Image: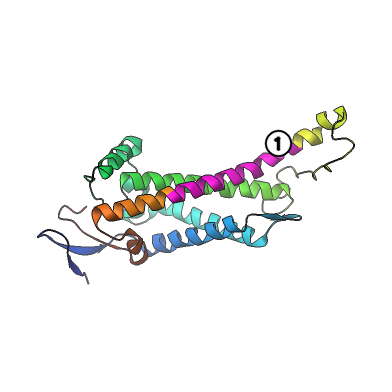
Amino acid sequence: MSISRTTPGPVRQDDVTVWDPLIRVGHWLLVIAFATSYLSGEEEAGGPDQLHVISGYVLGAVLIVRIVWGFVGSEHARFRDFVYGPVGSARYLFNLARGRSRRYLGHSPAGGLMVLALLACLTGTVATGLVAYGELGHGPLAGMVATRPPAAPPNGHNAGSPEGAGSPESAGGEAESLAAELHGTLANVTLGLIVLHLLGVAGASLAHRENLVAAMIHGRKRRDRDGH
């Protein structure tokens, strides 16, 4: 049953379901899992905190479902519905800043680009986390990637020796730690994108006079005269 609303102007507009339950639940699971993983990211002796690991697995599972759903899911969940390219996204943002942006029933061009960027960064964060965890001898990649050697003592007698500097263990340690460093970098980039995403949601909500956060909870948005 639709609920009629009156928006500024004489045109009556009805609510329509835009975000299906899988999109809504998946969205908030990603929020919770990333926040939990990020806040529990400090490594303890012998490896990362277990809460960090578990939330990372949840994050990865939800990402897989969301990516698959982007090809086979409901209309506005599919990538083809909101992938417009960088030019369309830039034009939308320019018009949004001028207060003349078109309203989209699903993701706007800028919103769609942000979805792709977040999915890419989150996927990269999970993937590098699995590699780094495998280097410690844990997780599904344990035994498939080179084990990270123990850190050398700060004042070790081989620290400045030619043997220590040029040994395979030293070179391997630097290469294998790259996954952990990239994992942290991607997590921070993702956090930056989330901040931009929140600003974009706030800006679009004000520009189009609708609560986009509430829409991602109950799944409904108002339908315009032209269906957008």
Q: Position of residue 175 (x, y in %)?
A: 70, 36
In the rendered image, which quarter is residue 6 located in?
A: bottom left
For the question of whether residue 159 can be seen, the reply is yes
Which residue is rendered at x = 49% and y = 58% of the image?
Answer: 30
Which residue of the protein is positioned furthest toward the left in this rendering?
10
For the image, the number of numbered tags is: 1
Residue hosting label 1: 175
Q: Position of residue 50 (x, y in %)?
A: 67, 61
Q: Is residue 159 magenta?
A: no
For the question of whether residue 105 can be seen, the reply is no
Which residue of the protein is positioned furthest toward the bottom in this rendering?
1
Please give the range of residues in magenta: 173-195
122 lies left or right of 135:
left
Inspect the image, locate mark 1, and give the three-letter code of the amino acid beneath it: Ala
Which residue is rendered at x = 11% and y = 59% of the image?
Answer: 11
Q: Is residue 187 magenta?
A: yes
77 lies left or right of 225:
right
- Provide the secondary structure element on which disc 1 rests: helix
Which residue of the protein is positioned furthest toward the right in this rendering?
157
Which is more toward the observer, 99 or 165?
Answer: 99
Give the crowd class for mark 1: few <14, some 14-19, many >=20 residues within 10 Å: few
53 versus 132 height, above or below = below
Which residue is rendered at x = 71% and y = 50% of the image?
Answer: 142
In the rendered image, which quarter is residue 22 located in?
A: bottom left
Q: Position of residue 150 (x, y in %)?
A: 80, 45
75 versus 157 height, above or below = below
